[in-house]
Amino acid sequence: MGQHRMPRSSAFAALRRRPPALVWTLALLASPSLADERVGRLVDALGAARAAARDVAQAELARLLRGEEQISDLVDAVDGAPVEALRRVAVTLGEDESLLGLAVGLAGSGEADAARVGRWAIEAQLVRWSATAFDEPSVAAYDPPRQRVLFPRSWRERATFRLSLDPDDGGGVAAFDRLDRYGLGPAPIVVDPRLAERMVRRPAPDVLTLRVDGPWHEVLEALCSIHDAAYQLQGYAYPEQLLADPEDDGPSAPSLAWIHVVARGTSENAPVGVDLRRSGASFIADWCLEVRREGNLVRQCAAARALAALDWTAAVLWFEDRWLATGDVVALEGLLASASRGRVAPSLQQAGSVRKVLAVIDEEAREVAATR
């Protein structure tokens, strides 16, 4: 049986009924000679006069975009593009968790239009991750333990598990990490990369006490006192917030809270270099850029660990892509930090990847031994 074909005259008539801009877009997508320029042409098509043409171009752009290897093409494509096109590119990047790396690459490109699109896309990813990502911090203690601030009652009522840990074993970063992983607290404890770098380069003096113990929130305050730190509660939704829009029956992201450990305040109980009302999302976006910004490996790795502690799937996918593509040790730091919290990337469950990780660890161990 032969394949049924539309008569040529009928096909031509159907084509003539399509809007001219849509015909041009479809012809572009079918042209193999323009494959290398397709991203740029699609971005141009996002500014077409007809909405149908813009929708087709956006759908094809979403199919075409893959990862960070396309950063330079997309930077060139959005340069000077109309605002409508820039917003559609940002929406496309923001809707797919696997494209976070591409969004971060644009945000850190140094080009105005690309940086704007990248930042919008990161923010769109964060809105999909947590409905309260852009809320102001709701609980903060910038001079613990003298500034006593209570966490929500529901959190304190659940703090029945007691733990004991050495505040100096491995340094301040390791102490907060152990509290986050083993303290059974109600929210992740995320150390700000700036504070982490300071604790690595200028560690706190040894304390006389061998261990600190108690519920997670008391141990948190003790560690903050020892390591000259403080904390903010980001992304917490109070019960009245959750009931604010009972008629809104559309799908929405969950409200995810996390404890942001920052530098202790030095004057009027304000934290050093931290805006008191700055949202958690703005910090997270900056940490994404820190991961890519070369020149300070300590800060890069601290940013990767902070993102990994958030339980943000997009960040884990990004780390996995970078590790598989380039063997980036910063991405590996994030993958291992995520795995230590039970979120294991698929690639780390393969024997070849495990051997690759062990080879990196062996190499670093030899370098450390050679310096002693």
Image (cartoon, rainbow, N blue to C red):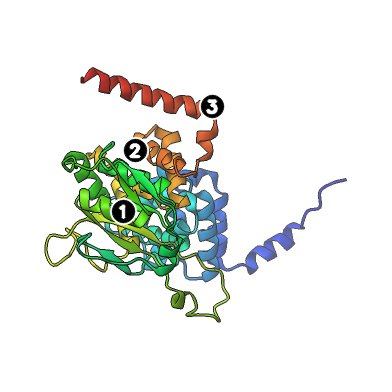
Q: Separation of disc 3 and disc 1 at Cα? A: 37 Å
The numbered dot on residue 220 is 1
The residue to which callout 2 is attached is: 330
Q: Nearer the viewer, residue 209 or 300?
A: 209
Residue 105 position in % (x across, y down): 35, 48
Residue visible at 42% across and 42% down in the picture: 319
Quarter of the figure with residue 135: bottom left
Q: Which quarter of the figure is the C terminus placed in?
A: top left
Q: Is residue 111 visible?
A: no
The residue to which callout 3 is attached is: 351
What residue type is disc 1 on? Answer: Leu
Residue 12 position in % (x across, y down): 68, 61
Front disc: 1 or 2 = 1
What residue type is disc 2 on? Answer: Val
Q: Nearer the viewer, residue 313 or 117?
A: 313
- Classify mark 2: helix, strand or loop: helix
Q: Is residue 149 visible?
A: yes
